[in-house]
Image (cartoon, helix red, strand yellow):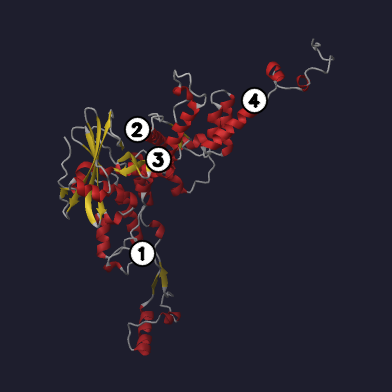
Amino acid sequence: MTIDWKEFNEKVVTKTHGKVHFYRDLYEGNHSQLFSRAKRLIKKGEITDEIIYGTHESQNVQTPYIIANVSKLIPEIPAMLVSRSIGNIQTSLSSDDYDSADEERAEDENYDNLTTQQEAIRDIESNSHLEFEHWGNIVQQQVDGGLVGVPWLDDRGLRLEFKARDVYYPHPDGMGVDLAYTVELEEEDYLQVYRERLEKDGLRATHMLYSCNKSGDTTLLDDDETKKLLKMDKLETFYPNRERFFIVYWPNEKTFMNPLGVSCLKNQEGKQDEINWTLTRNALTFERNGKPRIAITQQIFNELERKAVERYGDDARIDHRDLEITTFDENGKSMEIIQIDVTKIGDVSWVKDLMKIMLMETKTSEKAVDFYLDGNSSTAQSGVSKYYDLFTSLLKSEQLQKEYVYFLKQLIESALWLAHENDSNIRIEQPEISLKAMMPISRKELIEENNMAYKDGSQSLEVTVRRNNPHASEEWVQEELARLEEAAAGNDTTSLIRGQQTLRNYLDNRLGGGGDGDEEEA
């Protein structure tokens, strides 16, 4: 059972994916467009929308809508930890995997095949610009509640493409999936649908194009017009023996109630609104009452009015320069400056409590944002202390890391499947993705930790070189390994038999006797 696209509008998106646009606005900080209390204050002219977007009535108002966007930190903290931990992508194969019974094969053919395999993976990584995608992928997956990935092969090369959740529409019978999104072609709006459907002998991929009117009603175009508009030679491809989709979907916090996942910001909008409301109310109170005011006696005020009449003919036009002349009343009082204690305005502790609740419900470590609030970032801490301070965020991030690595492996395996169709020497595999520490440590600690592991025999030389130089290219790593192996192999025949070189065995024991246990060679 496929999807019959009779319409495509906000109602269709919301039915499948919920309030994805709402959560995006919440993350982006567009709160004045979301919360009714903010809208009401802006409309009444009591505040402005970040000063820039205020309505006409609020042009003279100086108090902006104050936003403390905790909703931005919630997805970005795990994205920061996970994205920095993703290392190099390497083939999981070795030269032994290419062994065959053919005795006439060249000795270096296995190495050439392995190089071809690694180059294919490297081309996929380079064409996809993966280094730029990790952070954004994880943030989008957290905010939307899901992320879509699909391998793609066209004139731009074989690559991975990542798309937002709201283009993904699985078929009711579970045997197919559509990617549906609006496109503008020749100044007209269309609905483009890419469909993958499992059949008995393989997978069928189809491109479709629908015209759309303003209400979202759609009409399927014929194949010739679709090819012309999409500039494609063929709209349908069958992949024999393919048993699963190329499209991969990564849900966030998947449950039976929410099989497509949920946003990490779900049910946080009420607390975010209260945080903004409290801060904005404090700003209004300060604007109205925080400025100094002058209190004077009735005699001074009468004298100011008299001078205003003499000078301007209007007792309302009081000149502030006349306040330099003053009198005292019978109690010896003159004018006073009155100002409220601004430290008593509002309740910042209430705002902090709301923030703590948001962080708790979203499994975000409070210490991850505490230095913004308390200014304690300069305090020196050991690595163990940092680990336990960020324990909750690290637990959440490790789960996301595991899922994201699996997501990437599935996509690269599908991309290699397409590459294998064009080059049989390329093997279909799930590559190895090296992982680095989520928390940064000093280079000295990094080297000491890895060198100790190598010395104890719990880590190979190659892994040690890679971890000591996490940003080095694959070519540099291989050259460094070759240099180290060459240096380790710099022994003569005597040293191989009798151990590492000394002056005596270097001279082949020609120095004669004198030492304990020395014997003259025959």
Q: Secondary structure at mark 4?
A: loop
Q: Determine the CA span between mark 1 and mark 4.
A: 77 Å
Q: Earlier in the sequence, mark 1 or mark 2?
A: 1
> Which residue lies at the image location 37% right of the left edge and 90% below the top edge?
310
What x and y, as percent, mark residue 60?
32, 69
Which dot, 1 or 4, sits closer to the camera? 4
How many discs mark residues in the rendered view?
4
Residue at which label 1 appears: 287
Q: Amino acid at mark 3?
A: Pro
On-image quarter of the N terminus: top left
What x and y, as percent, mark residue 216?
17, 51
Q: Is residue 371 left or right of residue 233?
A: right
Residue at which label 4 appears: 489
Q: Earlier in the sequence, mark 4 or mark 2?
A: 2
Q: Determine the CA span between mark 2 and mark 3.
A: 37 Å
Residue at which label 3 appears: 78
What x and y, as percent, mark residue 410?
35, 32
> Which residue lies at the image location 38% right of the left edge and 42% below the top edge?
157
Q: In the image, is residue 237 above or below residue 344? A: above
> Badge 3: how crowded within 10 Å, few (<14), some, or many (20+)?
many
> Which residue lies at the image location 41% right of the left edge and 57% below the top edge?
343
Q: In the image, is residue 138 above or below residue 294? A: above
Q: Quadrant of residue 56?
A: bottom left
Which dot, 2 or 3, sits closer to the camera? 2
Q: Earlier in the sequence, mark 1 or mark 4?
A: 1
Q: Which mark is residue 421?
A: 2
Q: Determine the CA span between mark 3 and mark 1.
A: 38 Å
